[in-house]
Amino acid sequence: MNSTNSFSPRRGHTVRLVLLAATSGLALTACGGADDTPARATTAAVPGDQSSAGGEKKGTRPDRLLWMGDSIGEAQAPALGAAMTAGGITFKSVAAAGGGGVVGETAAPTWEELPGELAAFKPDVVAYQITTFDWGTPQEQRAAYERLTKTVNDAGAELVIVSVPPFKIDDFYKPHAAAIDTAPKSAESVAEQHPDTVHFLDASTLWGTDSTAAEAQRSEDGIHSCQQGSAAFAQWFGKKLDTLYPFTPAAAGQWATGAWTADKVYGKFGCS
């Protein structure tokens, strides 16, 4: 999938990445604002997921994970890849800036390229983060997530759908606010219909629901995450994967301050 970024870089600001690798968990600073005063968010005690998670753990440990999403997912991919690799899972991201969704007209490239990605990579698990472009009625959203379910399951993989973090609803997104709001509910309803092969994770247990709050860990643009927010997500996701499969996440100290923190994607969102 084409991962060319269609968004322009925003004014830079200073952020500090602080790792406290201890048995209590991973503490990371949130993205700093214009005053260069970072807010602190700790992911050591993430509340329990309130949505469907497919029941008891499966007997097979996943070996290969395909990550899907838009530019928000693209910013999370470097940290997630580092965490999954450290945990022994082969990782690939096809998150695409300006697209990556499965609902509506903007989803055409996804549907064209996904079968080939599945055939070539052969994932055990496909993790799809709902995109900011999953616009449509609830019925259209459910139909798209059902199609994604069938496509992934037919390829021999299970599907994990993750809700999108809270993000700034600017003038571009305002006309689609209602669809953005219903997408997670539509996805969860599909997961409930396929409890053995589809799982829905409610990421508000990590990010909250207010994009302006420190808990949301958004970058200067109010939409994407910087390195520390992405690391917090990667740790959260690993713990959630451990509730679904016999998978033990790698300790944060093994990956959270690696080379991925210098990935060029963060420069596009004013991170440093």
Image (cartoon, rainbow, N blue to C red):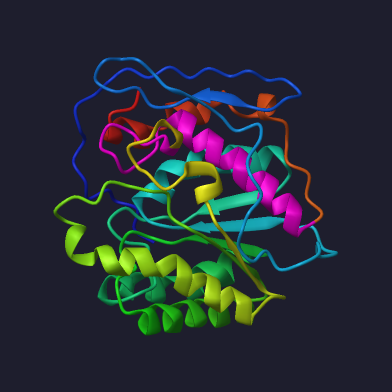
Q: Residue at x 31, y 30 (%)?
A: 267
Q: Residue furthest left?
A: 171
Q: Nearer the viewer, residue 152 or 122?
A: 152
Q: Quadrant of residue 157?
A: bottom right
Q: Position of residue 85 (x, y in %)?
A: 66, 42
Query: Bounds of the magenta span?
Result: 216-245
Q: Quadrant of residue 232?
A: top right
Q: Nearer the viewer, residue 203 or 147?
A: 203
State whether residue 101 appears in this view.
no
Q: Position of residue 106 (x, y in %)?
A: 27, 70
Q: Nearer the viewer, residue 134 or 124?
A: 134
Task: Examine the rendered structure and indicate whether residue 106 appears above or below residue 164.
Answer: below
Left or right: where 232 falls relative to 157: left
Chief secondary structure of the magenta portion: helix
State whether residue 225 appears in this view.
yes
Could you tell me which quadrant the N terminus lies in? bottom left
Q: Position of residue 257 (x, y in %)?
A: 57, 23
Could you tell me which quadrant the C terminus lies in? top left
Q: Residue at x 40, y 68 (%)?
A: 183
Q: Residue at x 28, y 29 (%)?
A: 270
Number of numbered labels in the structure image: 0
Task: Examine the rendered structure and indicate whether residue 19 appears above or below residue 235.
Answer: above
Q: Residue at x 42, y 34 (%)?
A: 217
